[in-house]
Image (cartoon, coloured by chain):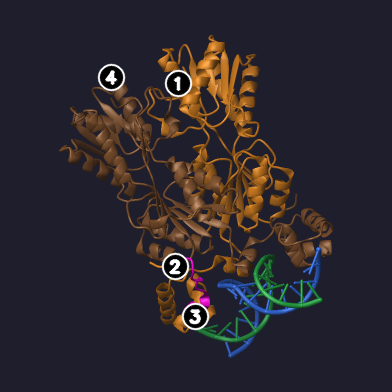
Chain colours: A orange, B brown, C green, D blue
DNA sequence: GTGAAAGCGCTAACAT
DNA sequence: ATGTTAGCGCTTTCAC
């Protein structure tokens, strides 16, 4: 096979000449637009296939002023939660002719701004992006873009256009209420130390509010940086329990470190959930199969992706107030008594 | 804020008029191309920023016949391994002005064909795609595309252009040799039943070859469908050990089900690694922190992504033979004696 | 049912 | 250092 880097790509004109049909009609056939006789249709299709013609969407997009792309902007791919959201988006976009294009920000507003600028320069038909906190420039770009903008995951804040998500403040508060009702009183929190992870921050705030309403204060905190893993969960748990051995509950900012904590506690022989209760956040089912099921809150990831896609595709119209609020769902597991 | 869906987007011409500078010079400033005086530069930048101008890459791409996109085509995002590959690609592309665009095939050749067609219609500067098995039409498209095509993950097969990966046959064979050397003889295999997961298939083939070379045959097999989770690992392990209680080793097609198997065996009180040895594949560190570390093979995911990106970006030239073969790395863990 | 002409918003190439 | 012209490969629009 000869080096492919030489040839120039084929154009509509090539197909037109090979089939003896005008460029315009070729274009119609290839897009299934307008009436074309079965005979010419056949000729065109054959010619296109024989030559190996691949349409040029750059030219098509410029001419039609429409591009079938949806920009999806998320903080991370290694987080386990975003692939789920993407799955929902992708499933719902499948029959619309729209295609998701993913950009990753690494939780950096500056990077988000760059990614948005870059994506908007392709003139997509819509934007789905995680979170409500954006730089001023990012908000301006989005507001000026003239396309639907769906902010997802989080409902605690101001919309640019339309929001689909859950209230993380509420998720945190409800978890606090659950564990207080179960009689736990010496509560610790283990979470990520990322000022830019606003959802984790809001859960923590809601959690503290919930405790405060019952006159309870956090009795311990442990923060970490970087990604989440079972190992990190173990280390943090060991540390917080060393510093505050009388804790009777640990609330983790996600299931992965929560599961690590659970393993550590089982190793050390803690009586769970009686001596010590545990809970995480997200509701990832990858981790079902651990010795106990960690209590958690389902963040409704797939459904958030689906609804956002439906909105951006125009399958569904935004409600009054432009906020679709889903309910975070408590999943008891075995680690709360 | 008024509904943004009305306004038409700004053009170079708008910036030109607002700044009193020709479109061409505006274009030069915005792309940092050619000499522009500091004064006009300033004027243009101010005007662009004030107006909120976002360049139109559709038009730019058509005019320049160059697009700074790299198509990255992978089977799945929920597999844990592909985010790592993407991380490598993305890191290495960061300073090149090239941007990865991800397409997902769900292990379906038909879908791969559609995704490729779609991506190629954007005339990207290069393609990185997982695996060597493609439909005839896909291979033709790639060969005709005129751009660099890097096939990744797997080196056991024919290249379209250039390959970066490991030999999964070798990975399987080496694992067989390790465990035979450790004295295991009653070997079982637990794997996915996806005819289209060619890499898993090749590992299994290499594994059986390695066993056969010592006159050993697989003493049990268990297949599953769908995604991998700890729970599925437990179930499969229970099943295979019920049917063949005398097995002394289990080789899993990935770390996630392997870890589930490990948990099951620990629950049941198996003496690991003496009575029963276990190994997985991939080398994911998310699972460090389990009671024992599962033996596995590091598939060199991040490095594969990096090298592929270097090739496609022209930072590195393909070797003679056009195959970059990395060595799968055995990681002993605690589950092989 | 089919075709011809104009133009989408940029940049390459060539002035000046 | 800046401007002018032509044209990238399609689709829109209008004509037949």
Q: Chain of mark 1?
A: A
Between B137 and A307, the one nearer to me in the picture: B137
Distance, label 1 to label 3, CA atoms, is 66 Å
Task: Residue B167: give x, y in percent of width and height.
Answer: 34, 46
Residue A213 tag number: none
Q: Residue farthest to the top?
A: A246
Circle 4 chain? B
Q: Residues within 10 Å of mark 2 (few under 14, many from 20)?
A: many
Is disc 1 in contact with disc 2, using a CB cutoff of under 8 Å? no
Residue at (67% x, 41% y) in the render: A109
Q: Residues within 10 Å of mark 1 (few under 14, many from 20)?
A: many
Q: Which residue is mark 2?
A: B144
Tell me the SS state at disc 1: helix
Label 4 element class: loop
Q: CA distance from mark 1 to mark 2?
A: 54 Å
Q: Is residue A1 left or right of residue A191?
A: left
Between disc 4 and disc 2, the foreground one is 2
As displayed, is residue B122 above or below residue D4? above
In front: A156, or B32?
Answer: B32
Residue B308 is a magenta residue: no
| Residue B313 pos. (x, y %) | 53, 55
C-beta proximity under 8 Å, tags 4 and 3: no
- From this view, report whether residue B14 is shown above or below residue B168: below
**Magenta-tinted stretch:** A5-15
Marks 3 and 2 belong to one chain:
no
Residue A14 is covered by the magenta coloring: yes
Counting residues from the start of the chain, the first of labels 4 and 2 encountered is 2
Q: Which residue is mark 3?
A: A16
The residue identified by callout 1 is: A262
In which chain is the residue bearing label 3?
A
């Amino acid at each position: 096979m000869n080096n492919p880097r030489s040839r120039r790509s084929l154009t509509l004109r090539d197909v037109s000449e090979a089939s003896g049909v005008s460029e315009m009609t070729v274009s119609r056939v290839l897009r299934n637009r307008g009436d074309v006789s079965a005979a010419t249709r056949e000729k065109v299709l054959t010619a296109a296939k024989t030559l190996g013609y691949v349409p040029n969407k750059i030219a098509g997009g410029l001419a039609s002023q429409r591009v079938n792309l949806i920009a999806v902007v998320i903080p991370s791919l290694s987080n386990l939660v975003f692939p789920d959201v993407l799955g929902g988006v992708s499933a719902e976009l499948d029959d619309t002719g729209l295609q998701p294009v993913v950009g990753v920000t690494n939780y950096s507003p500056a990077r988000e701004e760059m990614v948005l600028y870059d994506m908007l320069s392709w003139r997509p038909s819509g934007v789905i992006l995680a979170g409500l906190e954006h730089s001023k420039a990012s908000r301006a770009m989005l507001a000026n873009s003239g396309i639907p903008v769906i902010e997802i995951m989080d409902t605690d804040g101001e919309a640019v256009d339309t929001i689909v998500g859950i209230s993380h403040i509420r998720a945190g508060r409800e978890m606090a209420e659950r564990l207080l009702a179960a009689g736990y009183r010496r509560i610790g929190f283990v979470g990520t130390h990322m000022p830019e992870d606003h959802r984790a921050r809001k859960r923590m705030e809601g959690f503290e509010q919930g405790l405060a309403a019952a006159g309870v204060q956090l009795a311990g905190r442990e923060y970490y940086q970087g990604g989440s893993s079972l190992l990190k969960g173990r280390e943090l748990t060991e540390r917080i329990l060393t510093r505050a051995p009388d804790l009777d509950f640990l609330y983790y900012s996600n299931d992965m470190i929560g599961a690590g904590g659970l393993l550590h506690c089982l190793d050390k022989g803690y009586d769970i959930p009686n001596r010590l209760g545990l809970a995480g956040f997200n509701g990832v089912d990858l981790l079902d199969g651990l010795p106990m099921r960690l209590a958690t809150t389902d963040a409704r990831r797939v459904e958030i992706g689906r609804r956002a896609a439906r909105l951006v595709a125009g399958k569904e119209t935004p409600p009054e107030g432009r906020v679709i609020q889903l309910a975070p769902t408590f999943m008891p597991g075995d680690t709360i008594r």
